[in-house]
Amino acid sequence: KAGVTQTPRYLIKTRGQQVTLSCSPISGHRSVSWYQQTPGQGLQFLFEYFSETQRNKGNFPGRFSGRQFSNSRSEMNVSTLELGDSALYLCASSWLPTGHNEQFFGPGTRLTVL
Amino acid sequence: ILNVEQSPQSLHVQEGDSTNFTCSFPSSNFYALHWYRWETAKSPEALFVMTLNGDEKKKGRISATLNTKEGYSYLYIKGSQPEDSATYLCAPNTGNQFYFGTGTSLTVIP
């Protein structure tokens, strides 16, 4: 069974640009969550999607958005990039969206904003 | 925002030593707690999903306990091996989202 995949793995952008990251969950998983990790910080929850609906959103500005498609693949978009958006972005998939279900993480996308 | 504290921040042990880490979190609004192992250059890997007060889970040499009334969980590693070197993350869930601690970085010296 293929794991969670994320594309691209590395990305370099400049301030003010926008970026789209993609996450393909494990086959059959309908919940996808996104996290940001910056140096010295724990993983910060961005949002969670289940059956194409955003269930929850973390404490991030509106520049961060996402969506989920009917095949459960998810994308997140960051507009008007700032230097502080440089981070590792991880997505995780699970069978159902409850906290009782094991999450499987992808390898992450390393975003550098210059 | 949930304040999740993990201690110690880092740990160096000799191969064969047993060790344990602590995860502290507010006991209110508890729904579940996950433990993850995150090795360098890899993805976080789920170790345990814990939901009930008094839960004890075990996987090989690694085990975990949960006390939801006082808001803590312990992770134990018996007879540490070099391959156990990783950062161990705990993540309480309130039913809405996960809140990750900054982790305990374990280095096992051969």
Image (cartoon, grey):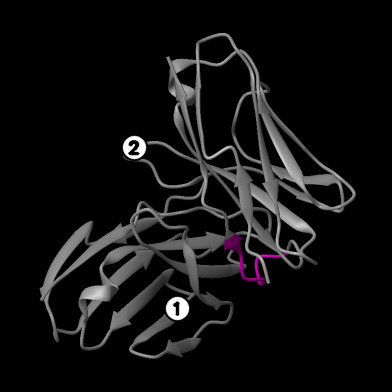
Closest to the observer: A31 or B82? B82
- Name the chain letter of the residue that bears numbered label 2: A
| Whole-percent x, y for residue A33 in the image | 66, 50
- Name the chain letter of the residue that bears numbered label 1: B
- Nearer mark to the viewer, of 2 and 1: 2
Residue drawn at (75%, 68%), measured in percent from left and top? A95
Above or below B108: residue A67: above
Q: Main secondary structure of the magenta part?
A: loop
Q: Which residue is mark 2?
A: A39
Helix, strand or loop at label 2? It is loop
Residue sitting at the far top: A16
| Whole-percent x, y for residue B3 in the image | 43, 50
Q: Which residue is mark 1?
A: B67
| Whole-percent x, y for residue B77 in the image | 28, 82
Magenta span contains residue A61: no
Which region of the structure is painted magenta? A98-104
Looking at the rendered structure, the kind of residue marked 2 is: Pro
Residue drawn at (62%, 59%), measured in percent from left and top? B94
Above or below A93: residue B13: below
